[in-house]
Image (cartoon, rainbow, N blue to C red):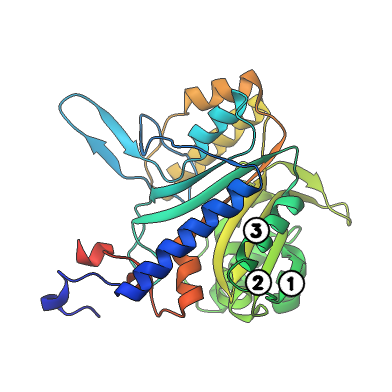
Amino acid sequence: MIKKADTWKPGSNLRTLKYRSFVMRELRRTLSDRGVLEIDVPLLGRSTVTDPQLLSFSVTSEHFRGFLQTSPEYFMKRLLASGSGDIFSLGKAFRAEEEGTAHNPEFTMLEWYRINWDEHQLAEEVIDLVSVFIPSIRVSKLSYGEVFEEFLGINPHNVELSALRNRAEEANLGNWSRDFRSGCLDVLFETFVRPNMPKGLVVLYDYPSCQKALAQLHLDHKGQKVSRRFEVFLNNSELANGYFELNDFSEHQTRFKEDRRERRAMGKSLPVDDKLLLDAVKAGLPNCAGVALGVDRLLVQLLGAACIDEIMSFSWARC
């Protein structure tokens, strides 16, 4: 708890600020040395994402209405469709989530895309990047289905929704009778799986198809339809989220419609499709993999901080 009399002070000390600066430099240097071009995109856009799990800040004035961007993804994909090649962005993103030890409405995100790479190649590069700061870190690569079955005895890809709802309610995790499959999987994962995963760096891949977001789908080695999505965890803290990117125009339209249907059922706002993104996809988004990494969360782990406030100059609690 921050004392009211101390809210004028920065949350991080000078040593932390210097280390943060070092980490930012090394992230830039490592990707630049690997031939990835740093780009700069707007923080304020006319459109926002439809993802049911994300809430955006709207910005209004007498002359226009826009949104603070939840990530640089849509602008970066427009660059990719224009022939930019491999690119990265290191800057601010905004999400209207609850403030907490691991969340701040304004945060620093590193997002990058690799042309003609798949999700496994990009996950290896995430490992390389973290290894710059933690040499010889223990790495585990597991499928989402493997860890879910290990800790819950449930195959997340084919279990009935009613069974997921019952399991969540039996664990006193609330009433899930009206929730979607993705929400039930998330609450069970957060409660029973994530806290029990191995320490070090864990890469989970082949997520359930209901959690596909804007990732392509394929059949895994068991013939189950899964999303080509991966997440990276550092000491059980979510660090990065990546996809083998969807580049089919009509499927993008379908996904956005599905998002709005789910948002409507959740009582959330209903953003319109980002037409400029769709135009870019239609023009030809190349085969690529992309990932977003939370820099603040990385710093929390590297410095052993108790919360995100300790590694920022001014978290929302101090603004």
Nearer the N terminus, badge 2 or badge 1? 1
Tell me the kind of residue under disc 3: Val
Q: Quadrant of residue 57?
A: top left
The percent coordinates of residue 1 (x first, y second) are: 25, 80
Disc 1 and disc 3: Cα gap in Å? 13 Å
The residue at the point 88 percent across, 57 percent down is 222
Label 1 amino acid? Ser
Which residue matches tag 1?
A: 140
Q: Is residue 154 left or right of residue 168?
A: right
Tell us which disc is closer to us: 1 or 3. 3
Query: Residue 153's x, y, as percent?
Result: 75, 75
Q: CA distance from mark 2 to mark 3?
A: 10 Å
Q: Circle 3 is placed at which residue position?
A: 126
Q: Earlier in the sequence, mark 2 or mark 3?
A: 3
Q: Is label 2 in contact with label 1 (beta carbons under 8 Å)?
A: yes
What's the residue at 39%, 49% (across, down)? 92
Other residues around mark 3 within 10 Å, as few (<14) / some (14–19) / many (≥20): many
Q: Amino acid at mark 2?
A: Leu
Please indicate, yes or no, whether residue 314 appears anywhere in the rendered image: yes
At label 1, counting other C-alpha atoms closer than 10 Å, the crowd grade (few under 14, some 14-19, many 20 or more) is some
Q: Nearer the viewer, residue 312 or 53?
A: 312
Q: Is residue 60 left or right of residue 99?
A: left
Visible residue check, residue 156 = no
Q: Is residue 141 left or right of residue 64?
A: right
**Position of 248 compared to 302: left or right?**
right
User: Residue 201 bears which disc, if any?
Assistant: 2
Secondary structure under tag 1 reads strand
Quadrant that contains the C terminus? bottom left
- Residue 8 in the image: x percent, y percent? 14, 69
* Residue 119 position in % (x across, y down): 72, 49
Which residue is found at the position 63% from the left and 25% from the top?
83
